[in-house]
Image: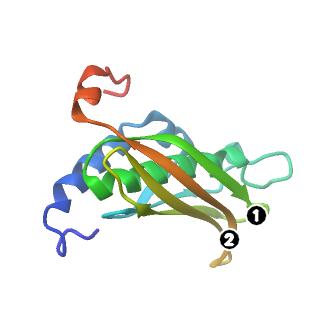
Amino acid sequence: MQSKADPEFAAVAERIHANVGRQGFMNLVGAELSELSRGTCTLAVERRPELLQQHGFFHGGVTAFLVDNATTIAAATSRGQPALTAEYKLNLLSPAVGEKLICRARVIKPGRQVSVVAADVFCVSDGVEKHTATALASIAMLGEDVIAETKSPAA
């Protein structure tokens, strides 16, 4: 975490960690927030049978979920405000075979209303990373008023 270089980021990071911890789907999938700094986010998930498709590869839906969540979290860290995925383009480059799937997202252009975020997904096999997917996302930046009006089932 980048709190020492960016003292204002500590509160943002704490809020994001708390919000991520309340996400039922993150817990269901078993994904973890492994790295967080302003404008970046890394999510990872260990291989389990429930996350695989019929050939033993990580399911494309798991890759898409990691991209969706990591890009939104990265955007939220860049401006310190809530965010929501508006759209993303995902390219699956090769089968996701390995013990772990890692998604690294980084903000390309922060914006008041929309931020552009890129993500790359890697599969780890015997300590070696293989690039398996890449994505570009448009993330809607939300005002606190929108969040206040929404009742969260996770709360």
Q: Is residue 31 left or right of residue 94?
A: left
Residue located at (41% from left, 61% from top): 109
Does the residue at mark 2 contact the one at mark 1 (Cβ under 8 Å)?
yes
Quadrant in which the N terminus is drawn: bottom left
Residue 100: x, y in percent?
62, 63
Q: Is residue 87 left or right of residue 6?
A: right
Residue type highlighted by circle 2: His
Residue 154: x, y in percent?
36, 28
Q: Earlier in the sequence, mark 2 or mark 1?
A: 1
**Residue 74 versus residue 122 in the image, above or below:** above
**Colour scheme of the picture:** rainbow
Helix or strand or loop: what does disc 1 sit on?
loop
Local crowd at mark 1 within 10 Å, few (<14), some, or many (≥20)? few
Residue type highlighted by circle 1: Leu
Residue located at (13% from left, 66% from top): 7
Local crowd at mark 2 within 10 Å, few (<14), some, or many (≥20)? some
Helix or strand or loop: what does disc 2 sit on?
strand
Residue located beneath label 1 in the image: 93
Residue 131: give its label: 2
Name the outermost residue toward the right. 55
Quadrant in which the C terminus is drawn: top left
**Label tally:** 2
Residue 26: x, y in percent?
48, 42
Q: CA distance from mark 2 to mark 1?
A: 7 Å
Residue located at (31% from left, 20% from top): 151
Q: Is residue 58 left or right of residue 113?
A: right
Residue 147: give its label: none
Depth check: 154 or 80 in front? 80
Splitting the image into 4 quarters, where does residue 125 fall?
bottom right
